[in-house]
Amino acid sequence: MGMGKARKFVHRNLVMIVMVPVLLGVHYGWQKVQDTEMFVPKQQRRDLPIVEMSGVVLEGERVKGVFCHSVTHPSYLSMLASYRKLLLSAYGPKGSSVLISNAVGREALVSSSSEIIKELSFAHPTTKYINALISAQNSSCGLNGLYTGLVCVRLLEEALRCEEDMLHPLVSCISEWIISQLMEQLNQFPAQVVMELDIGDMDQVVCFVKTIIGAKRCLGLTHSEANDLTINIVRAFLRSIPGEYMPGGFGHVSITAQEDGPSSPGGIFEGVLYRNPDVSLTKVEEVGARGEIWLLLFNVALSYTEETATVVWGGPGTKEESFGSLVLASLMSVLKKRNISIVANQKSVHPVIKFELERAGWLVLERLGTSATEALVRVSGCRAVGTLNNLPGELNDAVLGTLTSLQNVAFNNRDYILLDHSKGCVATLLLPSASPSILPTLKETVESCLAGLRMAVVDGKVVCGGGCLEAWAATTVTRLITTKAHLITAQPAASPHHVVKVGNIFVRMLMELALHLSGGSSNRFDWSVDTVFHHLWHTPPCLLKDGTAPGTGLPASPSQRCVCGLVTQEAVKYKYNGWWKPVEFQLSDHVPTFPPQHKEGGQKSGKCSRSTVHVHSSEQIESDAESLGHCTEDSLEGCANTSDEDVDSLEKTTCSLEEEIDSLEGKLESFDLEEYDSLEDLLERDAKPEDDGETGQVAEAKLEGHVPGALYDSLAAKMNATKLAFEGFSQLLHIGQCIFDK
């Protein structure tokens, strides 16, 4: 009975029983198709995983949590462009501060490469690699950190775009050739952009420092404030230079900020300046009157903290009380035994310990900070005590410092203590009052100026700033490609089109940086480049073809000096017979093609071209002989007549050549050779300038000397930044996948 009912139910609902599983299967399959990106049009896709800077999630079982990002993915180029815009926003005179809210919810106003790297946690390996290059540049030179990152990321971004229609080996090969050629030119210290730095010329040194400060518009300094800060930096640097040789090479400049308060200027002091309102002025005078002053320095806190909790104590009372009694007993024993007058600490001192030491007659200076502590080590020759685990032994073996001067100083209605030694080479630069958000950038800028001065004094050379160096480099790349393209096109599968396409990467990058450094418009018709020094010039608004519309004509009257101020209009136009042309962001599509170079027998290019000419001549003779062989009698008579005419013309040519030789001999006899010291003078006298104002005269062009208001940059820092950026670009260009975990 039950089986019959079941059979009837199946027959009655057969369609439903069959269709429900089928519909469920179709629905499940459609869900899978919707989740697959390649099967769905972009407009109809559901919320698929978005490829961000962190990469694409690999959902395999064994790679759970691992991210893989291909350099060919469009999001990779988008990430590089976003990273470049971030760096560019704080670069040069156009740069500004960047307000950052990081992952932990902390807001910060940054305007330098070191601050950007510190405040943002970059997850992508590429950005981390470039950040490492920037940090290496900042630690070694203190300058051009943003420049390093911008050059590297811009070249990488453009090179990856080139690979859309070029093979990767071609892009890599041509890029490495351009880099090697450009670095070879820079290593020769070209006189068009490199000049000597005279440390005795104060105006030139001030201009060098002012260029670095002027690139930080975010500081908000007025013209007079920037001048005062520049002069104070130069004075502090000169006071830190020792009169005699010392192992460190230079002294030390301690940078100190003023407390919050009304706007007040900065100052320069010889020695270490210490600010503490709790120090008794009378006590300072008593200690300063002792002549030779002995000093003990700590760089570990003299208070009960987690850092000093490992100290062994005993006896009744709390741990903090036991710590204080143990440290105080050990300190007083050593201070009395070794006749020490000052106890200084980079960090804090426990109030009880400080009170007992001051009551016993010692001067206690706490919370010196890193800069003042380093300066105190330099000026006194002491060695800081860094551990309290074995305090009696550490104090007995401590290297004490000595001072010869200790005095009270009042500046801007504030009391300071000035510590100095007669043989010390330490100066303190007191910064002008600034807002807390700008103070870190101001300190970093001053440190960059001091680092640049040290490198400039050691090298004795500076390079032109304001974008003129980058404009020269872009023109140099253009000249290298147009004159030496055959060295690359001789490679298999390489063509002039490939060389031009890769060369455009470097020209575009360099010219963009040049215009950004100059701080003006990015329109190419607002700028020009001279054909002698290849410096950047402000183009007047009269760049017109017919006086009505902008055109590509040459500027009618460029400004009197280039952007860096080291080249005059008269020098380009009259001394070197040059002219000006609008800046170019790309090379011409036409690159001269060269014949293939044969390397048989080790012949040079000149020999190869000569042998090629002989081959063509012999082929032409053979073809002429064959044509003569097919001539009829009438045609032979015509050929004979033409041959007679050719002979007559050759005789006339020979006569004319003999006349020219006779005239040249007459000119040589008319020369008075005694008036010339050498054959070179004789040749230079009759030499004629070439028609082209760009070739043959660049080697003669040389920066004549310092000009008031000129813009300079550190040659050593710029060279190191360029080298780091090129090396980083070459390494990143060979990467195919970026794999990392979160």
Image (cartoon, rainbow, N blue to C red):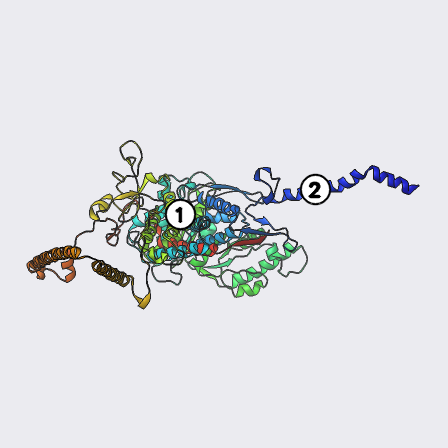
**Which residue sits furthest right?**
1
| Element class at badge 1 | helix
Left/right of residue 742 with respect to residue 176 in the rendered view:
right
**Residue pointed to by mark 2:** 26
Left/right of residue 703 with respect to residue 280 in the rendered view:
left
The answer to whether the residues at label 1 and label 2 have Cβ atoms under 8 Å apart is no
Point 32% across, 66% down: residue = 600
| Among numbered discs 1 and 2, the one appearing first in the sequence | 2
In the figure, 107 relative to 687: above or below? above
Q: Position of residue 297 (x, y in %)?
A: 50, 58
**Quadrant assignment for the N terminus:** top right
**Which residue sits furthest front?**
633
Residue 241 in sight here: no
Q: CA distance from mark 1 to mark 2?
A: 54 Å
In the figure, 4 relative to 153: above or below? above
Q: Nearer the viewer, residue 622 or 533?
A: 622
| Element class at badge 2 | helix
**Residue pointed to by mark 1:** 509
Left/right of residue 628 with respect to residue 377 in the rendered view:
left
Q: Nearer the viewer, residue 466 or 731?
A: 731
Q: Position of residue 638 (x, y in %)?
A: 15, 54
Residue 315 in sight here: yes
Q: Which quarter of the figure has residue 23?
A: top right
- Mark 2 surroundings: few (<14), some (14-19) or many (≥20) residues within 10 A: few
- The mark lying in front, picked from 1 and 2, is 2
The count of marks equals 2
Identified by mark 2, the residue type is Val
Q: Position of residue 59 (x, y in %)?
A: 63, 50
- Mark 1 surroundings: few (<14), some (14-19) or many (≥20) residues within 10 A: many
Left/right of residue 731 with respect to residue 519 in the rendered view:
right
Identified by mark 1, the residue type is Met
Q: Position of residue 58 (x, y in %)?
A: 61, 51
